[in-house]
Structure formats: C-alpha cells, structure tokens
Amino acid sequence: MRSMTGYSKIIEENEHFRISIEMKSVNNKGLNIKIKIPNFLNFLENRIKTEIGKKIHRGYIELKINFEDKRENENLYYYNRNNALSYMKILNEIEKEFSLKLENKVDMVVKYSNSINKQDIEINENEYTEFIMPVLNKVIDNINEMKQTEGERLKEYFIDLIENIKNNIKDISYLKENVVENYKNRLLEKLNNYKNEIDVKEEDILKEILIFTDRSDISEEYSRLISHLEQFLIELDSKHNYIGKKLDFILQEIFRELNTMGVKSNYYDISKLVVDCKSEVEKIREQVMNIE
C-alpha cells in the first residue's frame, strides 16, 4: 500500500552529460503528469510519461529536468579566421586612406565581422535517452519507496481505527438485544399512565411490539458491517499497491450501514456508539484520499 505523497531528486553526471531530475507527487483522483524539460528534450516527453505510468497509477506528478551536454560548452563557438582577417584588412585600409588611427579595432572585428559564431550541435537522441532514462527510473523508484513508507505508516493508523470501530460494534451487538425490551417497557409504562383513559387490548400491544421489533432489527446491517470491516483489513494486506479507490468504496459501504443502524435502532446507547464509529470512519476516509 502506497500513499500518493512523495518527493525525490537525483543529480548525476558523467564525462559528457550532467542531469538533475526532481519529482513531486500529491494526491489526485487519477494520474496527472506535468513535465518541465528543455525544448531539445521534447522528443522524450511521451517516453517519460509512459515510464512514469508503468510504476505510478494515481497522483498529480510534477517532473522537472535540467540537462547539460558538456561537449556543447567545449565547442559551443567557433572562430572564422578568414572573416576576421578580411575585416581587419579593411580597417587598416581605412586608416591609411584617411590618415587616422582607429581605436579598439579588435573589438570592432569581434562585433561586426561575424568571425565568432555559435556551433549548430547535432543532438544524438539515442545517446541522450540512454543516459536520461536510467536516472529517471531511479527517481521513480525513490519516490515510490517514500510513498511505500508513508503507506505502511497509514496502514497501522487504519488498523488502530478499525479496531476501535470493531470494539464499538461488539458493544452494539450486546445492546441490540435490549432494544425491544427497552421499547416494550417504555410502551407499557406509557399505557399504564393512561390506563384509566384508554382501553388497549393485549393483542394490540403485542402487535405494536412485533412491528417495532421488525422495524428496529439491525441484525442484517450488523452482519454486513462486520463483513465490510474484515474486507477492509484484507485489502490493507493486499500485495497490490493501487487499492485507494477500493478502500474508499468499502468505507462508503461501512458508513451506509452505520447510518441505517443509527436510524433503525431507536436506542440512545446504540446511537451514541454509531456516532463514535462514524467519527472513526471519517478519520480513515480523510487519509484514504491519499492512498494510491
């Protein structure tokens, strides 16, 4: 189980290249990848997104790559000797023609003779790819390791909260046996208060109690709730990393059963325990939103 929050940065270099790759990940409903790379690496953008998608299924990913080809720095400019000599010859002729001394002739040659030019470096895409992709995979593996660590921490947190819910559910299982008896006693007490004013047959009382028994029975909800809690724990132990959506679905089902139990029970002690359970479920759902 992995969270969707992580960060990784790697800087590597060899004789020819230097690269810095930085990746950040936060929670998101699906997989959204934002890439910032130098224009000359645009040929790699789809390959990079595909590589990330192989190892990360959910999250908002920001990736930034800075890349330097050291060979470009060494041979970035070239000197055109013929242009410089031709321009200097003209300057000398101007001095002779007008009997004057020009200042900063070298500066003029550099500025106007087009004697220093930038090389057009041919990009070797295969060479760049072979250097960049292994570094990218290291960054992805590092961020997944961080997400895994955070996921394990959240797993322990979820288990503790599920245990709290199970304890409350156990108490509810004891209390639900008292619901009908409690209602029967309250009903008889009310009828006793008005026994001189109204005439109620015993069969009517029994019918009312039976109706209430059927209406307030939470046995099915209780069984389904136990099943959902167990299923949640099974998913936590799953070897699959991408369980966030499934966990959220199970929690929705747990919340639905708790709501129904609270409405049907009509018993304060059970209602209070249901509220406590729902509070724990909300805590879990808050963090499950960050599970990949």
Image: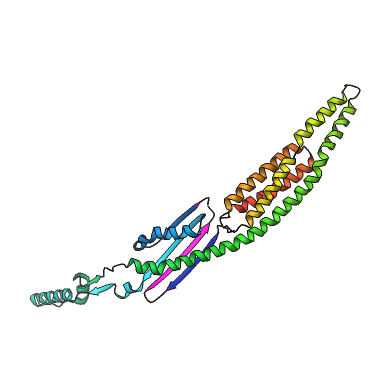
The N terminus sits in image quarter: bottom right
Q: Is residue 266 left or right of residue 197?
A: left
Quarter-of-image position of residue 290: bottom right
From the viewer's side, name the closer residue of 76 and 239.
239
Residue 57 coordinates in the image, percent (x, y)? 51, 55
Q: Is residue 223 shown above or below 62?
A: above
Residue at 52 percent across and 66 percent down: it is: 142
Segment tinted magenta in the rendering: 13-30
Q: Is residue 92 left or right of residue 22?
A: left
Please state the total of marks drawn on the protein image. Answer: 0
Residue 239 coordinates in the image, percent (x, y)? 59, 59
Residue 140 coordinates in the image, percent (x, y)? 49, 64
Quarter-of-image position of residue 265: top right
Query: In terms of secondary structure, what is the magenta stretch mainly?
Result: strand
Q: Is residue 78 left or right of residue 283?
A: left
Q: Is residue 149 shown above or below 27?
A: below
